Amino acid sequence: MAGRWLIVAPHPDDELIACTGLILQSPNAEFQLVVATDGKLGLSKNGPGVRGYELVLWRRSETAAFCQALGLHKPVFLDFPDQGLRAEALAAQLLVLGAPSPFDRVFSPHPIELHPDHKAAAQACLNVFGGYLGYVTDGVLQDRLGEERAPDLEVELTPKQWQRKQELAECYRSQRHFLTERLQAVERFWQVGRRR
């Protein structure tokens, strides 16, 4: 798979959770990551007591390290307020980003996500990119209602890619506890599915 692809992550670390497999399995694609919010309300209690703008800078450096480790372009940070993302404002920024050279494919959260920032990101992408939109996940994840989301592209990771994803999760030390739980849940889901 090749082309110029955009990943819209509502928060710093969403790209790891949803799109690592896609990136690992698409070496010929040119990825641009856009992080919509500042991540200021992240789970800093799992880091060393970092709060506010200091946490924003820390999370930016984590996302930059993730991109560098995968050979991606530098991420674009739009710095909308965490848990205050508005679809219209994000759509305006995405129009500017896509204007010089259109993206071949855009990946965003699914529109039925429960988190308001994820919903806003999905709506903004639908408004701006419409037919180019794809929902992607490294394995089918269950939302908090227990319903499966049906992505356009479900990427099943090889054991080596899964190991790489876990290594890349170390880039996000401020969110370690949350990410460890999330990645373990996905791994358990796959293991059950493989036994069937």
Image (spheres, rainbow, N blue to C red):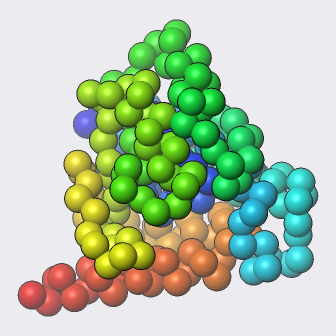
Identify whether 183 is placed above or below 113: below
> How many numbered discs sit on the rendered protein?
0
- Apparent side of residue 195 relative to residue 66 in the rendered image (left or right): left
Residue 89, percent across and down? Answer: 62, 30
Answer yes or no: is residue 160 visible: no
Residue 42, percent across and down? Answer: 72, 66
Identify whether 138 is placed above or below 189: above
Which residue sits at x=74%, y=41%? 79
Quadrant location of the C terminus? bottom left
- Apparent side of residue 73 relative to residue 145 in the rendered image (left or right): right
Quadrant location of the N terminus? top left
Check the image and name the residue furthest to the left.
196
Which residue sits at x=89%, y=54%? 53
Residue 152, percent across and down? Answer: 23, 48
Which residue sits at x=72%, y=73%? 43
Residue 41, percent across and down? Answer: 75, 63
Answer yes or no: is residue 89 visible: yes
Which residue sits at x=42%, y=59%? 113
Check the image and name the residue furthest to the top.
100
Identify whether 51 is placed above or below 57: below
Choose top left, top right, bottom left or bottom right for residue 186: bottom left
Choose top left, top right, bottom left or bottom right for residue 171: bottom right
